Amino acid sequence: MTGARHISVLGATGSVGLATLDLIERAEPGRFEVVALTANRNAAGLAKLAIRHRARFVAIADPEAAEPLREALSAHPEIEIGVGAGAVAAAAARPADWTMAAIVGAAGLKPTLEALRQGRALAFANKECLVCAGALFMREAAACGTRLLPVDSEHNAVFQVFDFERRDAIRAITLTASGGPFRDWSLERMRSARREDALAHPTWEMGAKITIDSATMMNKGLEIIEACWLFDLSPDRVEVVVHPQSIVHGMVEYNDGSVLAQLGSPDMRTPIASALAWPDRMQAPVARMRLGELARLDFEAPDDVRFPALRLARSVIRAGGIAPAVMNAANEIAVAAFLAGEIGFLDIVGSVEEVLERSLVDADMPRDVGSFDDVYAIDARARELARNLIETRSTHTARTPRT
């Protein structure tokens, strides 16, 4: 392409957003120009990034962070400031050639949708868009002519070796999972896992929510659903294998027996660089992978007993309808409760499963997923059910005498 590629980063102060801006800063001058940046509540971080990258517009979701942001940018009147969820969506709607959608969770659905409707290139680390509203999201992307560029390391890996022109030659794809910090823990030991244990990921540096999802393997469950929509595959053609070294990120198996894999060091800047430069390539400051220095590459089947999230996710895919959005919302609430010390580690997936069961008989739960408004309503009600469940359990636990 000629001229600068205009870039917006939604979720600029998170790990993916920071890695994206790091790559932009390292690129040759004039290759990229930052249009808009957003953050949830990190006003100081957002202001620093806006100044460094000469952003034209910044948006902070949390109104309480508005004044600190204005103060931090008081000497830069050329940078326009927006506040609230509407401003974040407005940032996403600003004309850009390429947008990074890196807002974690269902909160990223509306702004990601705004970016998608521009009909340009959308790089997304927000898997929840496809989990909660897969059919709607893919239909909208096709209608707008938007190029979807996956940034999750596994989906980006598959994207790089997936022959879209000869889809009928593809037998299956495989997503790899590190196994997280509890890969070798017994179920009994996992029962007493602490917050710091779950956040100690052995190979990846990620935000807290995604790190906990990796520990429960719910992250991989969500990724199975995402892959089904992104690559238009049935669930039985999306496989998962545990690979603790995190060197092989994804594989595509073809009908002739060939298996093409993407390998690389466990550094998110590789898949981000792949998406940022697409359809070209760019330099990324990642450690070179030298196969001669790798003692071994291990692969094993996931344990559905210790990590029931995979089983639950596959049942949700089969159920369809409201189930994926309910599972995602309940998981977000359960992860937050675990991080706050309100529930135990094994209660995360257990709570999600119970919310799914309650949603089937809940009179206030919407039943249709015919529009994005339906998705928002399902998400809101599922969160309410999850909070009620966790509050009830916490109250019961507090009243139960210790023996």
Image (tube, rainbow, N blue to C red):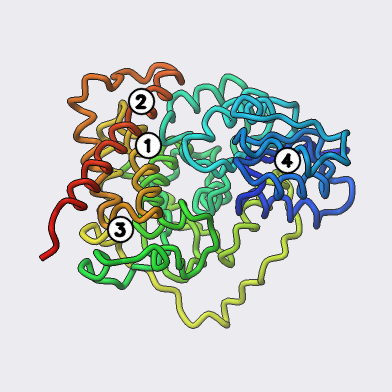
- Rendered residue at 17%/51% (across/down): 399
Q: Residues within 10 Å of mark 1 (few under 14, many from 20)?
A: many
Could you tell me how far apart the alpha carbons at marks 3 and 1 are, in whole angstroms? Answer: 17 Å
Q: Residues within 10 Å of mark 2 (few under 14, many from 20)?
A: many
Which is nearer the N-term, disc 1 or disc 4? 4
Residue matched to label 1: 329
Disc nearer the start of the sequence (3/1): 1
Q: Position of residue 299 (x, y in %)?
A: 37, 68
The vertical placement of 126 against 401, above or below, is: above
Q: Which residue is mark 3?
A: 345
Q: Residues within 10 Å of mark 3 (few under 14, many from 20)?
A: many
Measure the alpha-carbon separation of dots 1 and 4: 29 Å
Above-or-below relation of 247 to 19: below
First in sequence, mark 4 or 2: give its number. 4
Residue on which the image places disc 2: 378
Q: Position of residue 31 (x, y in %)?
A: 84, 46
Mark 4 residue element: helix
Image quadrant assignment for residue 144: top right
Question: Residues under labels 4 and 3: Cα distance?
Answer: 36 Å
Asked whether the beta carbons under mark 2 and mark 3 sit within 8 Å of each other, the answer is no
**Residue for badge 4:** 69
Q: Amino acid at mark 3?
A: Phe
